[in-house]
Amino acid sequence: MTTELFQKPDEKFYTDAANYWSEIPATVDGMLGGFGFISQTDIKDSKLLLKQLFNCKNPPGRDHALDCGAGIGRISKFLLTDVFDKVDLVEQNPTFLEQAKRYMGAKLSRIGDFYTEGLQRFRPESKKYDVVWIQWVVGHLTDNDLIDFLVSCQDGLKPNGVIVVKENITSTDEVEMDRQDSSVTRPMRLLRQIFDKANLECYRQAKQRNFPKGLYSVYMFVLKPKKVNDVVEESTNESEIPPAEENGNKEGHDQNEETR
């Protein structure tokens, strides 16, 4: 699949995805495409990334985070509410958001606003968030819409705020299309180009460890708005989270792209 084809706006791309998710049960297993058992492993490395980020020079604050493509709030419940005073959720499926209000349990008191909106249309409130967390959802945006969304997220950041993208990456240099859920998985090269076009620098990059064989490689990117004469404090290698032993994972479509 060529990049040029995917850059063209296609409302059917979005309606097909919405229709797919409307049939998915509002459970952790549903959000994870049948791979609910990876949730703890996923959260563990995400927590380590945030811990290290807060120990860096000029760290983000811990007041407010935004969970993008939040689903039923798995990431908000087990990750973001443990770190931030308030967390907002944005999710286009209203059924998932209603379930999130129940699923959060006692942590509901740490939830701020619920936004029922697709990310291709959502624009964060200006200077509201310390961290914007975007996980397993950018594959549901066209290249141009993703660039526009990332640009708008920068306006939503407080001083020292960051955007975290956690996403599947192909092992080839090709964009891979999943027509069942109407999403794409991008190669590293293209995703980094998109970050650059959105005027973002990759401050940190780490590979998710210990996922089962047969799943896509998953990477976490900590992104900051570019500044004139800005010096990147950390190289973008994967040394921040110690790498797991290589397990020979091969790419496949088993892991759903929008895993909330």
Image: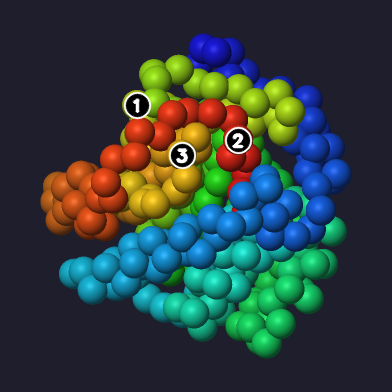
Expressed as whole percent of the image width and height from the top left, the position of residue 60 reads: 34, 70
Task: Assess disc 2: are there few (<14), some (14-19) or many (≥20) residues with their C-alpha within 10 Å of its C-alpha.
Answer: few
Q: Which comes before the other along the chain, label 1 or label 2?
A: 1
- Residue at point 65%, 26% (across, down): 178
Secondary-structure class at tag 1: helix
The three-letter amino acid code for the residue at tag 2 is Asp
**Of the numbered discs in the image, which one, if any, rests on residue 213?**
3
* Camera-side mark, 3 or 2: 3
Q: Which comes before the other along the chain, label 3 or label 1?
A: 1
Secondary-structure class at tag 2: loop
Q: Which comes before the other along the chain, label 3 or label 2?
A: 3
Q: Mark 2 highlights which residue?
A: 254
The answer for how far apart the CA atoms under marks 3 and 1 are is: 23 Å
Task: Assess disc 1: are there few (<14), some (14-19) or many (≥20) residues with their C-alpha within 10 Å of its C-alpha.
Answer: few
* Camera-side mark, 3 or 1: 3
Residue 211 against residue 88 in the figure, above or below: above
Secondary-structure class at tag 3: loop
The answer for how far apart the CA atoms under marks 1 and 2 are is: 22 Å
Q: Image check: 226 left or right of 47? A: left
Expressed as whole percent of the image width and height from the top left, the position of residue 254 reads: 60, 35
The answer for how far apart the CA atoms under marks 3 and 2 are is: 10 Å
- Residue at point 71%, 82% (across, down): 105
Q: Mark 1 highlights which residue?
A: 189
The three-letter amino acid code for the residue at tag 3 is Lys
Expressed as whole percent of the image width and height from the top left, the position of residue 27 reads: 75, 60
Tell me where residue 62 sits by quadrant.
Answer: bottom left
Quarter of the image with the N terminus in it: top right
